[in-house]
């Protein structure tokens, strides 16, 4: 495949500076609302470092125009003791049966390990205000996946079947150092999921994590962008291809994004991709996991 030469557009979405959104626009999650407008959801933090979900509306033409940055939450923290009681983050959003399905991450602190991260589902009619489909997660621990890291789900629907790629914990080396890779699940309705327990992308030697997969299906092929790192706080963006969605070939060297930017000197992570007028755009985060906001890049070639 031809090398992906992404042209950076810079920092485009900043934290809303509300009481619930003092810093960060983490895990940008876009969806096309109209032919001229896209909505990008993100996780933003209050002074206690707890995250809620907000959004920004953008118009992408020759110049990028911010139409609106939300002043109200789209989704708040879960109830005390629930899997998402200390933070929620968006991961994927799709349209299904005249509703918006947002697959999100629930964050909860732990005593013996730093956190648990589990996937949940919330639903909306207007694409702005979301309600939990269930108070429980949509993924669950099992003998192959006993670690409470089942997170960052990416969901797409092809014909009558739903596919999910998600981050799955392998083990904790110490309280602050988990290892995780990317696994695969399927569903008939987008609600009840069968976890195949199959690893789609494995860690390479000395790698610690493969994070936040984002998949599109184009030209009869699955394309995945994701984050990978060896040392905590040094994420890079990788790329892989698959003919069936299960067996993937990593092609990290095919990604070309100039690293010279004030907002991404140490790390670049959590890519999401959207197609607008035959162009691909990548929303992603930079240093300190998106503390300053969301960056944008445009692909100068077509995927093959």
Image: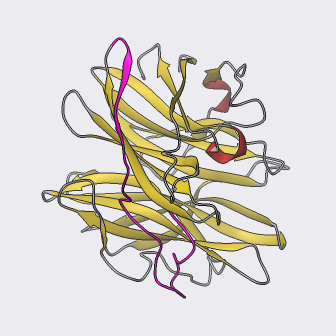
Residue 200 falls in which quadrant of the image? bottom right
Residue plotted at (78% across, 47% down): 233
Residue 218 falls in which quadrant of the image? top left
Task: Confirm whether the magenta stretch covers residue 67.
Answer: yes
Drawn side of residue 5 relative to residue 93, left or right:
right
What is the total number of numbered labels drawn onto the structure image? 0
Position above or below: 271 against 64: below
Residue plotted at (76% across, 84% down): 111
Residue plotted at (56% across, 82% down): 141
User: Residue at the left extreme?
Assistant: 98
Numbered range of the magenta stretch: 62-89
Position above or below: 300 against 159: above
Q: In which quadrant of the rendered image does the C terminus lie? A: top left
Query: Of residues 257 and 47, which is closer to you in this image?
Result: 47
Query: Of residues 151 and 303, which is closer to you in this image?
Result: 151
Q: Is residue 269 visible?
A: yes
> Colour scheme in the image?
secondary structure
Task: Confirm whether the magenta stretch covers residue 173.
Answer: no
Query: Of residues 8 and 165, which is closer to you in this image?
Result: 8
């Amino acid at each position: 495949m031809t090398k992906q030469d992404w042209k950076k557009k810079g920092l485009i979405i900043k934290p809303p500076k509300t009481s619930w959104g003092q810093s960060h626009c983490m895990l940008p999650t876009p969806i096309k609302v109209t032919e001229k407008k896209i909505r990008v959801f993100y996780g933003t933090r209050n002074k206690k470092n707890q995250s809620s979900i907000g959004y920004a509306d953008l118009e992408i033409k020759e110049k990028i125009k911010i139409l609106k940055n939300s002043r109200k939450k789209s989704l708040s923290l879960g109830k005390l003791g629930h899997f998402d009681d200390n933070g929620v983050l968006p991961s994927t959003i799709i349209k299904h049966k005249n509703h918006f399905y947002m697959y999100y991450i629930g964050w909860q602190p732990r005593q013996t390990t730093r956190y648990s991260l589990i996937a949940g589902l919330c639903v909306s009619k207007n694409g702005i205000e979301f309600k939990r489909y269930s108070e429980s997660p949509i993924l669950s621990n099992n003998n192959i996946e006993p670690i409470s890291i089942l997170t960052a789900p990416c969901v797409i629907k092809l014909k009558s079947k739903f596919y999910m790629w998600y981050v799955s914990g392998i083990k904790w080396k110490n309280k602050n150092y988990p290892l995780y890779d990317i696994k695969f699940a399927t569903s008939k309705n987008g609600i009840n999921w069968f976890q195949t327990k199959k690893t789609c992308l494995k860690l390479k030697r000395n790698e610690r994590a493969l994070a936040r997969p984002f998949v599109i299906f184009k030209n009869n092929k699955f394309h995945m962008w994701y984050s990978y790192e060896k040392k905590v706080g040094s994420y890079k963006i990788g790329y892989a291809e698959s003919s069936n969605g299960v067996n993937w070939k990593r092609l990290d060297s095919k990604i070309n994004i100039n690293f010279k930017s004030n907002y991404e000197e140490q790390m670049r992570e959590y890519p999401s991709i959207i197609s607008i007028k035959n162009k691909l755009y990548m929303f992603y985060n930079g240093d300190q996991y998106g503390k300053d906001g969301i960056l944008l890049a445009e692909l100068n070639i077509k995927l093959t």
